[in-house]
Amino acid sequence: MRLLATWLINALALLAIPYLMHSVSIDSFGTALLVAVVLGLVNAVLRPVLVLLTLPATLITMGLFIFVINGLLFWAVASMVDGFHVAGFWAAVGGALLYSVISWTLSTLILQK
């Protein structure tokens, strides 16, 4: 049940991003649900590998390179899923940052124990 709630919260967070950034667009709620699944899978599988491979760059930049990784993954998911569009790299970095803040805020408000 908690997994389903988290999935819906992430989809709602994705739907909120186009209202805050005009360089990100999502066509429908169904697209947001699909993007939430794909983004979750990409973050679960690819992100740890990329973080490990780019560890020297992350250490040199004192952790700021993680924003680049998040933006690249957000942008990659936008290129994989029809109906989810991101204008460019910096829009992807901003969208990934907004997505994480909104989804974290919603899940702390809704899924409190």
Image (cartoon, rainbow, N blue to C red):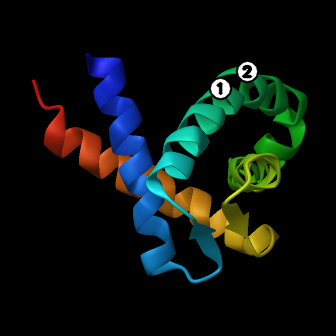
Is 107 in front, or is 49? 107
Residue 106, numbered label: none
Q: Residues within 10 Å of mark 1 (few under 14, many from 20)?
A: few
Q: Nearer the viewer, residue 53 or 86?
A: 86
Within 10 Å of disc 2 (Cα), the crowding (few <14, some 14-19, many 20+) is few
Q: Is residue 83 above or below residue 21?
A: above
Position in image of residue 73 (x %, y %): 75, 46
The residue wearing badge 1 is 41
Viewer-nearest of discs 1 and 2? 1
Residue at the (82%, 54%) spot, across then down: 79
In x, y percent, where is residue 20?
Answer: 45, 78
Report, in whole angstroms, how far the alpha carbon at label 1 lies from the one at label 2: 6 Å
**Residue 82 lies in quadrant:** bottom right
**Which residue is denoted by mark 2 in the rendering?**
45
**Amino acid type shown at disc 2:** Val
Element assignment for label 1: helix
Residue at x-position 71% and y-position 66%: 85
Q: Residue at x 68, y 47 (%)?
A: 63
Which amino acid type corresponds to the residue marked 1 in the rendered image? Leu
Indicate the quadrant containing the C terminus: top left, top right, bottom left or bottom right: top left
- State if disc 2 and disc 1 touch (CB < 8 Å): yes
Horizontally, residue 108 falls left or right of residue 3, namely left
